[in-house]
Amino acid sequence: MSCRSTRTRRALAGLVAVGLLATAPNGFAQGTKAYGPGVSDTAIKIGNTAPYSGPLSSNAAVPRAEAAYFRMINDNGGINGRKIEFISYDDAYSPPKTVEQTRKLVESDEVLLLFNQLGTPTTGSVIKYVNARKVPQLFIASGATGFGDYNAYPWSMVLSPSYQSQTRIFGKYIADTYPNGKIAVLMSNDDFGRDNVKGLQDGLGDKLGNIVAKITYETGAPTVDSELLQLRASGADILVNFASAKFAAQAIKRAAEINWRPVHILHGNSLSISAVLKPAGLENSKGLISANYGKDPEDPAWKEDPGMKRFLSFFSKYLPNEDLSNAYVSYGYTAAQAMVKVLELCKDDLTRENVMRQAENLKDVELDLLLPSIRLTTSATDHFPIEQMQLQRFDGQRWLGFGPIIEGLVKAE
């Protein structure tokens, strides 16, 4: 064999080796960097829309907590040396405003990804646009079952269990515990309400006929007082309250005012003590039943828990003016922590494609405020990272879990 032939073979082998490096698991050779829009050696831009004003303004504690968490990360050096630039706009829980602000984030601010956009009708107004632009839309602050449809929306992912999973749990609990109960349902006249009722009906099974009233309200209405009077008049002894925070509080308070004391099931989105139960009256809220996947910061059972200690340290330093009993703060912390985990996994490949790849490959990720046996797990065909919950009852001061951890049952197909 000639020396030239040997050199040629070695050169070809070297080229093959380079090619293998280029197709390494992270998608690029070790030591190189790949950036998408909004990324540099010093910064990562992520975008958000949330209701700082309007009927869901109480939920603004979510992005405030997220912004604070990202400040903490930045104060500690950022993500592999890059600071998070969190751009969050008010959409007032108005879908047209969400469209405007989302286009601004994508086309003008050129963010790498959209994070924890809040609301079902608002997110529904932009999800097709976001997927057409192939922008990661991670950990949407809605459990809308359709948003986890990985075929229709491969660039979108929720955080919480699907609404149908959550409310199916309620339906099964009612059917098992109160098989002869008469059920009245309060729901918003939108996709959020319809999604919730679908899960409830599935969970009730052959007790579906026990629903004797189903009243809708408009999110732009001032109160749900008249709706509560109609629900009481139905003769129901179980009230399923699928209202958002403001209206959930009104319903709890109004039920007490008209001396109606049904078994009261409250949607998990409205379990915040400071934003919902205190305005409704803690005494009026006593006995409420809901479900959650997280730890209550005010529950002494978690006093020595390492994750809770980290949260409380963060809270005292970065959110001194917030209410510890506000579940929206805890949720924002959890969502931001999940987002940081994904960005850390991306390392120096901060392209939109790799962000989505890492988000779809979470394996038993533990977060500080999730219940101990609950972990984030995803795949390319599973865009619901959290799929378990536990029923809980309000004792007048705090939520207390009861029963086993229940596996979510409904995903988008």
Image (cartoon, rainbow, N blue to C red):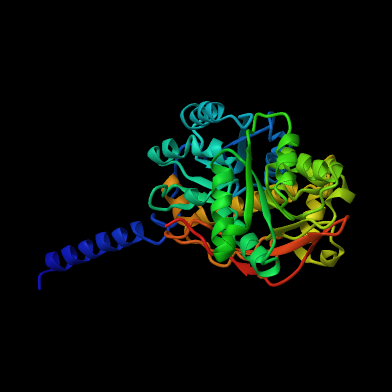
108 in relation to 317, above or below: above
Kindly give the residue lying farthest to the left in the view shown. Answer: 1
Residue 233 lies in quadrant: top right
Seen at 66% across and 60% down, the residue is: 367
Vertical comparison of 125 with 22: above or below: above
Quarter placement of the N terminus:
bottom left
Taking the image as shown, residue 307 lies to the left or right of residue 367, namely right
Q: Can residue 59 be seen in this view?
A: yes
**Between 112 and 135, which is closer to the camera in this rendering?**
135
13 and 368: which is toward the camera? 368
- Expressed as whole percent of the image width and height from the top left, the position of residue 126 reads 48, 35
Where does residue 130 sit, x and y in percent of width and height? 44, 38
Of residues 293 and 353, the one drawn nearer to the viewer in this rendering: 293
Total count of labels: 0
Q: Nearer the viewer, residue 319 or 404?
A: 404
Q: Residue at x 45, y 41 (%)?
A: 135
Residue 5 image position (x, y, % from top left): 12, 66
Q: State the residue at coordinates (81%, 41%).
A: 254
Task: Give the image location of residue 384, x and y in percent.
Answer: 53, 57
Residue 376 in sight: no
Instruction: Give the side of residue 256 with respect to residue 78, left or right.
Output: right
Q: Is residue 126 left or right of residue 42?
A: left
Q: Quick one: quadrant of the C terminus?
A: bottom left
